[in-house]
Each structure stands twice: as C-alpha cells, then as structure tokens.
Amino acid sequence: MSLTRRQVTVAAVAVVPLALSATGTARAAQRHRTLFIAGDSTAAQKYADAAPETGWGMALPFFLRKKLPVSNHAVNGRSSKSFVDEGRLDVVLQAIRPGDLLLVQFAHNDEKVADPARYTEPWTTYQDYLRLYIDGARARGARPVLATAVERRKFDVGGNAVPTHGDYPAAMRALAQEERVALLDVQALSLALWQRIGVEGTKTYFNWTATEQDNTHFSPPGAIAVSRLVARELLRTRVLGPQDVRRLDEEIPESWIIWPPAVA
C-alpha cells in the first residue's frame, strides 16, 4: 500500500489551517456543500465516444437540489487500491472542504485476483484502503459515506437475480458499522430491483446495443434508476435531509443525460 491510513490523515490535517479547523462548521454553513464521488466505471462520467453507456453519477444531480453540486471523480477500471495508488484520492482530499460529503463505491475491480495493481482481499486490504477514504474525509471535516457496489445483470436458469460481488458488500457493511459511517446498501437494493424488472426487462437498463451485450455498465434508464436508489439511501440514512433531494418519485427523461465531447 503506497499510503498508510496515518499518512493520509496526517497529510490532510497538515494542510488545514488551524483557524479553519476551529471555524470549519460555521464556514461550511456559509457555502454550499459538495458531494464528491470516488468510484469506478459504474459511477463515472462518460463521454460522447462511449454513449449510450452512462455512469450513475451522471444522473445523481437530477435527484439533488442545486445547492448540493456533485463532483464526480469516479474513473473507469479503478479499485479502492488503484484509485489511491494513482494519487486520485489525494486530488479529492485537496478539493474537499468541511461540510462536504465523500461517497465511496468500489468492488468491481477490487475483485480482479489476477491483477495485483487493483486486487484487494475483502476482509483485509479492501477494508484497509477504504479506511484511507474515511480518515481522509474526516480529517478535513467532511463526511464519508460508503456505498456497496451496484450489482451486475446476472440471472440463474430460474430467472433469479444472482449476486456477483462475493464478500465485498459484507466487508463494507462490517467496516461501516465498525467505523460508524453511513452505509448506502446499493448492492442489495439493485439486486432486488433487477429481480423485479426481470431477465428481459433489465436489458434496457444495461449497455445492450446492436454490437455489445454489457451486463455491468448502464444505459440512461439504468443509470437513472441506480442514482435514484443512491438518493433515496442518502435520505434514508439521514446523510441528506428532505430539503436536499428532489424528484425521487418523478419520471426523469433520458434526454437529460448528456455525454460531453471526449477529453483529449
């Protein structure tokens, strides 16, 4: 591990002026909070060259008030480990401020046993890396929030939605309880959602096109559905209040999804 839990915490504290530490709550109240997302491709911003693939983080702002902007740092292919090792957590911690939220969702790429750059073991290194996000956010007066990984589209021969993330959701749930961090159980909720929609219906929620049958990444309807689950969980866990959310029961037009030009 390139950064220890203590190193992230100490580094974060060191760059926060003492005056800000003492008055962080008051200053946070004077400005809009920001919700930061650290995660993988299921949440990430997608660009025109990837359309219609859509990360759920692209749709989350539709369910939040304008006073709560989203800063989406999720990146394709990253695990809790590689996101840290590449310095991406450092970038988030440099931008985050007292009162902000850091929503963390990883597991899809942590599961890649054959890739030492990304693999973590659920009950040891996965939890160790997640603690870096928790400690880093708290050191800056921000609130960490853990989200179990959204489920893939997988059904057994009987048409039952099947979990695909092994022990990672359980490990995150246990860590959230140990660290007293709010947990959004997106894995359980998305699995139940795919079960209700069914084998055929879920195809429209994932990136199924004429040339691709992708059971991991979302189409616009899928991203909107998952972001609605996230917003409802933020409300249920009291991370957000009723004044922070909107449209939880409204239809969101797919046309609201925008894929900007690809970054050079």
Image (cartoon, helix red, strand yellow):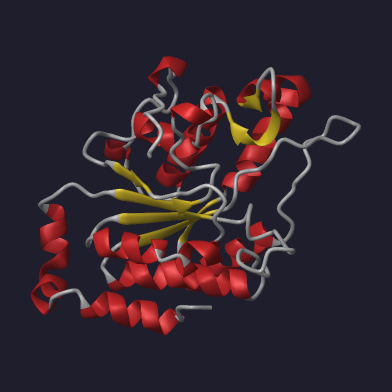
Residue, far right: 157
Q: Nearer the viewer, residue 26 or 76?
A: 76
Whole-percent x and y of residue 123? Answer: 66, 72
Residue drawn at x 8%, y 75% as measured from the top left: 19
| Residue 260: image location, x then y, percent | 37, 29
Q: Quadrant of residue 21?
A: bottom left
Identity of the residue drawn at 16% across and 63% down: 25
* Quarter of the figure that contains the C terminus: top left
Q: Is residue 165 above or below residue 160?
A: below
Q: Which quarter of the picture shows residue 255?
A: top left
Does 82 appear above or below 78? below
Q: Is residue 214 left or right of residue 155?
A: left
Q: Position of residue 241 (x, y in %)?
A: 32, 43
In the figure, 39 relative to 57: above or below? below
Residue 164 visible (yes or no): yes
Lateral position of residue 199 relative to residue 65, left or right: right
Q: Quadrant of residue 204?
A: top right
On screen, residue 249 above or below 170: above
Could you say which is closer to the camera, residue 215 or residue 155? 215
**Which residue corresponds to the image point at 40% horizontal and 61% vertical from the top-left?**
88
